[in-house]
Image: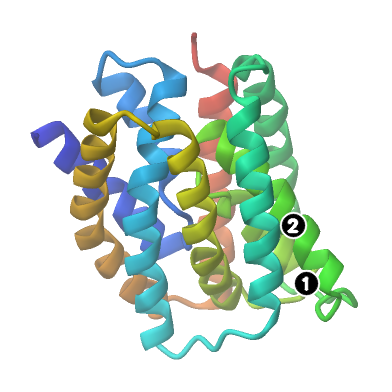
Amino acid sequence: MFKLFTIGLVGGLLSGLLGVGGGVIFVPLLTYMTTKNFKVNTGISSMAIIFVASASGFTYIMNGITLTFNILYLIVGGIVGGYIGSKLTAMIKTKSLEKIFSLLLIIVSIRMFLNGNFESSFNENPFFYIIIGIVTGILSGLLGIGGGIVRIPLLIIFGGLDNIVAQGFSLIATIPTAMTAAVTKLKGNPELIKQGTYIGLFGIIGSIIGGNAAFLLSQNVLNTVFAIFLLIVSFNLYLKKD
């Protein structure tokens, strides 16, 4: 139980602070601290993300983040992508996907390091949000992550949103995406559902702390912290052994 508490608390804290679902922490910690394989851990992570993203998203809304109708496009795309990704899990070699994904994160993090101010003409285009939802939903289903580590940079770079707003959007969109992935992967597996629930409940504590801390930091600091976080995650994925 202590292991589940540690995984939940750390993942929840980063979820609230950076606006991610926490899966990029849940999956590696589950892999390192338990005997379960990677693909099983992605399902447990998706279950935990439902709780953590809900708590973090509520914290952002309480701090004044206003959602627009575009969030619905993100959610629809995310649900479709989450279902596709979950079904593809058994068909695709995860290691190859991790390598490609890690290289993508490196490129995105460097882009965020170079420029903290982003302008875009796509911020009112519904198809843009649907595409982001589908792409990040597929990654969510495959890797057991909330998708925020890709969704947030895309919303900032191409959507022209402020970092804190993009984080709030991403957290809310993460909830139904994670639900889709969890239901598809953990259906008929009550023990795994219970473990994911424990991690999610413990993660709520960290997510509330991290979510409130995010509003105390400046835009440039958030961009820098997020870019560093992306680099750490990308190198971890690229170098991780089977």
Q: Which residue is mark 2?
A: 132
Position of 9 with respect to 136 (left or right) is left
Say whether residue 215 is left or right of residue 118: left
Which residue is found at the position 60% from the left and 22% from the top? 238
Q: Secondary structure at mark 2?
A: helix
| Residue farthest to the top, as pictured | 242
Where 11 sits versus 65, above or below?
above
The residue at the point 80 percent across, 57 percent down is 131
Q: Which residue is mark 1?
A: 159
Q: Nearer the viewer, mark 1 or mark 2?
A: 2
In this rendering, the answer to whether 16 lies above or below 110 is: below
Question: What is the secondary structure assignment of the residue under circle 1?
Answer: loop
Q: For residue 75, say whether it is visible.
A: yes
Which residue is painted at 32% across and 16% down in the image? 36
Residue 28: give x, y in percent of width and height.
39, 29
Q: In the image, is residue 233 above or below residue 148?
A: above
Residue 169 image-quadrant placement? bottom right
- Which x, y percent locates residue 239? 55, 18
Looking at this rendering, what residue extends furthest in the left direction? 2
